[in-house]
Image (tube, rainbow, N blue to C red):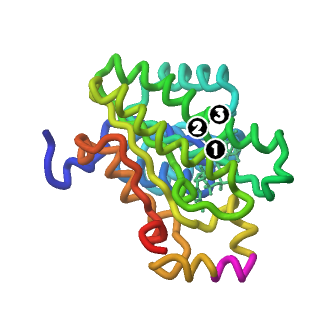
Amino acid sequence: MVTGLAAFDLTGRTALVTGSSQGIGRALAGGLAAAGATVAVHGRDAGKAARAADEISEATGARTVSAVFDVTDAAAVDAGIAALEAEFGTPDILVNNAGIQRRAPIAEFTDADWHELVETNLSSAFHLSRRVARGMIERGSGKLIQIGSVQSQLARPSIAPYAATKGAIVMLTKGLCADLAPHGVQANAIAPGYFATELTQALVADEGFSAWVRGRTPAGRWGEVDDLVGALVFLASGASDFVNGQTIYVDGGMTAVV
Ligand code: NDP
């Protein structure tokens, strides 16, 4: 067992971070690259993913590649992972970060939005985890990391379907642990609080809501995407080999207090 700070070193490891062309995923991909991993930077927009991959490589000196597929398309997921496996084998680290938000009062929530949320935030995590787990089982090691949300614990008006997908991520993580721990694979999740990204643009612009976030968060501020990197590097590295099935809330204390 590697101990001390060396346990956090990701040199020689490979990672796929879905939805890393911007926002939280991009910071997470940058953090893994800075820790030494070779990182596949992913999104639907090929140009945006390639630009982010180049910028991360330039900033960290790490090798990056770009991966482009729609996480809601199970066949595209299979093909995307097969292409990565041809390039560098089954990733040592999979971060299921790609996600969307849809808001409306429940009586007005459309079927289309419900299905899009479930496919993007939940079914994708199942498809990607299942596909990558096969190679991890064969190798006898791997780190599956899901990105959840404080909304797995805290509901608010107009987000019941989003909260349902993020609540399910907590139990998907525990179930993956039950299946995969005997194979040397760890499955954990990170649940962010409120972070200013494209996904929360409208909330940030709403000064009343923005002030509510600051007041409701014991740390007194919105999260900054780099706040998430420490927890991710820990969960992606050998430092967390005995941590399994857990969700770490990185939320400035929001879910710890009423
Ligand atoms: P952004 O909207 O900024 O980024 C979303 C990323 O996901 C983009 O790279 C986008 O790529 C990709 N993506 C979306 N849909 C698909 C799809 N169908 N197939 C492939 N890629 C897709 O979001 P955030 O960075 O804010 O959020 C990232 C994750 O963090 C989400 O799971 C979100 O639920 C979670 N989260 C966010 C919080 C916040 O406050 N921001 C709080 C708690 C959790 P492209 O543009 O190319 O489609």
Q: Which residue position holds label 1?
A: 49
Q: CB of mark 1 within 8 Å of CB of mark 3?
A: no
Hey, what amino acid is under mark 1? Ala
- Relative to residue 231, is residue 38 depicted above or below? above
The disc label shown at residue 6, or none: none
- Which quarter of the rendered picture does the N terminus lie within? top left
Q: What residue is disc 3 on? A: 71
Residue 79 placement, left or right of 238:
right
Disc 3 residue type (three-letter)? Val
Residue 90 is left or right of residue 98, and the answer is left
Span colored in magenta = 206-211
Disc marking residue 66: 2
What is the CA distance from the residue labelled 3 to the residue labelled 2? Answer: 14 Å
Q: Report x, y in % for residue 202.
A: 75, 68
Residue 99 placement (x, y as % from top left)? 64, 46
Q: Is mark 3 within 8 Å of ligand 1?
A: yes
Contact check, label 2 and label 1, Cβ < 8 Å: yes
> Percent from the top left, x then y, of residue 95?
48, 41
